[in-house]
Amino acid sequence: MTILEERQIPVQVKLAAAWTSFMFLYAYVDIIAFFKPGVIDNILAGKVWEFGVNQTLLTTFLALMAIPIFMVVLSLTLPARANRLTNLTVASLQIPYAAFNVVGESWTYFYGLGVALEVILLAFILRAAWTWPRTTSPSKLEPTAPHRPQIQMGR
Protein backbone atom coordinates (compact mmCIF):
# COMPACT_ATOMS: atom_id res chain seq x y z
CA MET A 1 0.00 0.00 0.00
CA THR A 2 1.36 3.40 -0.88
CA ILE A 3 0.89 6.48 1.21
CA LEU A 4 0.01 9.78 -0.38
CA GLU A 5 2.72 12.36 0.05
CA GLU A 6 1.86 15.44 2.09
CA ARG A 7 3.93 18.40 0.94
CA GLN A 8 4.06 21.60 2.92
CA ILE A 9 2.35 24.40 0.99
CA PRO A 10 4.11 27.76 1.38
CA VAL A 11 2.06 30.39 3.21
CA GLN A 12 2.29 32.70 0.19
CA VAL A 13 0.59 30.09 -2.00
CA LYS A 14 -2.14 29.48 0.59
CA LEU A 15 -2.81 33.22 0.78
CA ALA A 16 -2.86 33.65 -3.01
CA ALA A 17 -5.25 30.70 -3.35
CA ALA A 18 -7.54 32.09 -0.65
CA TRP A 19 -7.57 35.58 -2.23
CA THR A 20 -8.30 34.01 -5.63
CA SER A 21 -11.23 32.08 -4.14
CA PHE A 22 -12.43 35.21 -2.37
CA MET A 23 -12.21 37.19 -5.62
CA PHE A 24 -14.29 34.63 -7.54
CA LEU A 25 -16.88 34.41 -4.77
CA TYR A 26 -17.03 38.20 -4.50
CA ALA A 27 -17.58 38.55 -8.27
CA TYR A 28 -20.03 35.66 -8.58
CA VAL A 29 -22.28 36.94 -5.81
CA ASP A 30 -22.63 40.14 -7.84
CA ILE A 31 -23.09 38.26 -11.13
CA ILE A 32 -25.70 35.84 -9.74
CA ALA A 33 -27.54 38.81 -8.20
CA PHE A 34 -28.41 39.90 -11.76
CA PHE A 35 -31.04 37.13 -11.67
CA LYS A 36 -32.99 38.91 -8.93
CA PRO A 37 -36.18 40.35 -10.41
CA GLY A 38 -35.82 44.00 -11.34
CA VAL A 39 -32.02 44.23 -11.09
CA ILE A 40 -31.40 44.33 -14.85
CA ASP A 41 -34.28 46.76 -15.38
CA ASN A 42 -32.82 49.10 -12.74
CA ILE A 43 -29.35 48.89 -14.29
CA LEU A 44 -30.79 49.68 -17.73
CA ALA A 45 -32.58 52.63 -16.13
CA GLY A 46 -29.23 53.80 -14.76
CA LYS A 47 -29.67 52.80 -11.15
CA VAL A 48 -27.74 50.35 -8.93
CA TRP A 49 -29.19 49.99 -5.42
CA GLU A 50 -29.92 53.59 -4.54
CA PHE A 51 -27.12 55.03 -6.67
CA GLY A 52 -27.17 56.45 -10.15
CA VAL A 53 -24.85 54.65 -12.55
CA ASN A 54 -22.04 57.06 -13.38
CA GLN A 55 -18.30 57.10 -13.80
CA THR A 56 -17.68 57.61 -10.07
CA LEU A 57 -19.80 54.60 -9.09
CA LEU A 58 -18.21 52.30 -11.67
CA THR A 59 -14.71 53.50 -10.74
CA THR A 60 -15.50 52.76 -7.10
CA PHE A 61 -16.69 49.25 -8.02
CA LEU A 62 -13.51 48.66 -10.02
CA ALA A 63 -11.31 49.91 -7.17
CA LEU A 64 -13.10 47.66 -4.68
CA MET A 65 -12.72 44.64 -6.98
CA ALA A 66 -9.04 45.46 -7.52
CA ILE A 67 -8.29 44.91 -3.83
CA PRO A 68 -8.58 41.09 -3.82
CA ILE A 69 -7.09 40.95 -7.33
CA PHE A 70 -3.94 42.75 -6.18
CA MET A 71 -3.82 40.70 -2.99
CA VAL A 72 -3.29 37.57 -5.12
CA VAL A 73 -0.16 39.12 -6.63
CA LEU A 74 1.04 40.77 -3.43
CA SER A 75 0.66 37.51 -1.49
CA LEU A 76 3.10 35.86 -3.87
CA THR A 77 5.59 38.70 -4.27
CA LEU A 78 5.91 40.75 -1.07
CA PRO A 79 8.65 39.92 1.43
CA ALA A 80 7.36 37.84 4.37
CA ARG A 81 7.11 40.64 6.96
CA ALA A 82 5.31 43.07 4.60
CA ASN A 83 3.21 40.21 3.22
CA ARG A 84 2.00 39.18 6.66
CA LEU A 85 1.16 42.75 7.68
CA THR A 86 -0.59 43.52 4.38
CA ASN A 87 -2.73 40.37 4.55
CA LEU A 88 -3.68 40.96 8.19
CA THR A 89 -4.64 44.57 7.46
CA VAL A 90 -6.54 44.08 4.21
CA ALA A 91 -8.43 40.95 5.34
CA SER A 92 -9.42 42.72 8.57
CA LEU A 93 -10.78 45.68 6.60
CA GLN A 94 -12.64 43.42 4.15
CA ILE A 95 -14.73 41.74 6.89
CA PRO A 96 -16.88 44.78 7.77
CA TYR A 97 -17.13 45.65 4.08
CA ALA A 98 -18.42 42.12 3.32
CA ALA A 99 -20.93 42.36 6.19
CA PHE A 100 -22.18 45.71 4.87
CA ASN A 101 -23.37 43.96 1.69
CA VAL A 102 -26.07 42.04 3.58
CA VAL A 103 -27.44 45.03 5.53
CA GLY A 104 -30.93 45.99 4.41
CA GLU A 105 -31.20 43.20 1.82
CA SER A 106 -34.44 41.27 1.50
CA TRP A 107 -32.59 38.28 0.01
CA THR A 108 -30.95 37.34 3.31
CA TYR A 109 -30.32 33.65 2.45
CA PHE A 110 -28.49 34.52 -0.76
CA TYR A 111 -26.48 37.45 0.57
CA GLY A 112 -26.07 35.83 3.99
CA LEU A 113 -24.50 32.75 2.43
CA GLY A 114 -22.28 34.91 0.22
CA VAL A 115 -21.08 36.98 3.18
CA ALA A 116 -20.60 33.89 5.36
CA LEU A 117 -18.43 32.23 2.70
CA GLU A 118 -16.44 35.43 2.17
CA VAL A 119 -15.86 35.78 5.93
CA ILE A 120 -14.72 32.13 6.15
CA LEU A 121 -12.12 32.81 3.46
CA LEU A 122 -11.05 36.04 5.15
CA ALA A 123 -10.73 34.19 8.48
CA PHE A 124 -8.53 31.61 6.74
CA ILE A 125 -6.38 34.43 5.36
CA LEU A 126 -6.10 36.03 8.80
CA ARG A 127 -5.17 32.71 10.40
CA ALA A 128 -2.59 31.85 7.71
CA ALA A 129 -0.98 35.28 7.99
CA TRP A 130 -1.13 35.36 11.80
CA THR A 131 0.44 31.90 12.18
CA TRP A 132 3.11 32.50 9.51
CA PRO A 133 5.96 30.10 10.37
CA ARG A 134 9.03 31.72 11.85
CA THR A 135 12.65 30.71 11.59
CA THR A 136 15.59 31.65 13.73
CA SER A 137 17.46 34.50 12.10
CA PRO A 138 20.99 33.69 10.91
CA SER A 139 22.41 36.26 13.37
CA LYS A 140 20.96 34.23 16.26
CA LEU A 141 22.58 30.97 15.18
CA GLU A 142 25.86 29.96 16.75
CA PRO A 143 28.56 30.96 14.31
CA THR A 144 31.00 28.30 13.20
CA ALA A 145 34.63 29.26 13.53
CA PRO A 146 36.19 29.39 10.07
CA HIS A 147 39.59 28.38 11.46
CA ARG A 148 38.26 25.25 13.19
CA PRO A 149 38.01 22.14 11.00
CA GLN A 150 34.66 20.41 10.91
CA ILE A 151 34.65 16.96 12.43
CA GLN A 152 33.18 14.36 10.14
CA MET A 153 31.86 11.12 11.44
CA GLY A 154 32.94 7.92 9.74
CA ARG A 155 30.53 5.74 7.86
Image (tube, rainbow, N blue to C red):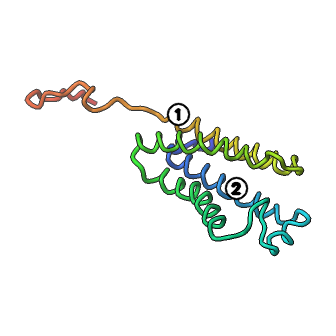
Snapshot quadrant of residue 80:
top left
Q: Is residue 95 above or below residue 56?
A: above
Quadrant of the rendering where the N terminus is positioned: top right
Q: CA distance from mark 1 to mark 2?
A: 23 Å
- Side of 64 relative to 73 (left or right): right
Q: Which mark is residue 109?
A: none
Q: Nearer the viewer, residue 114 or 102?
A: 102
Q: Is residue 95 above or below residue 74?
A: above
Mark 1 packing: few (<14 Cα in 10 Å), some, or many (20+)? few
Q: Is residue 132 above or below residue 143?
A: below
Which amino acid type is marked by label 1?
Answer: Trp
Q: Residue furthest right?
A: 37
Which amino acid type is marked by label 2?
Answer: Tyr
Snapshot quadrant of residue 28:
bottom right
Query: Where does residue 154 sit, x and y in percent of width and height?
Result: 24, 28
Q: Nearer the viewer, residue 147 or 79?
A: 79
Which residue lies at the image location 52% right of the left edge and 32% below the top edge? Answer: 131
Q: Nearer the viewer, residue 69 or 40?
A: 40
Q: Is residue 34 above or below residue 102?
A: below
- Side of 109 relative to 93 (left or right): right
- Side of 37 relative to 89 (left or right): right
Element type at marker 2? helix
Query: Where does residue 136 sit, x and y in percent of width and height?
Result: 34, 29
Which residue lies at the image location 66% right of the left edge and 52% below the top edge? Answer: 22
Query: Where does residue 137 sit, x and y in percent of width and height?
Result: 31, 31
Q: Which mark is residue 130?
A: 1
Task: Identify the residue position indicated by label 2 in the image.
Answer: 26
Element type at marker 1? helix
Which residue lies at the image location 53% right of the left edge and 49% below the top edge? Answer: 13
Query: Where does residue 71 sit, x and y in percent of width and height?
Result: 53, 53
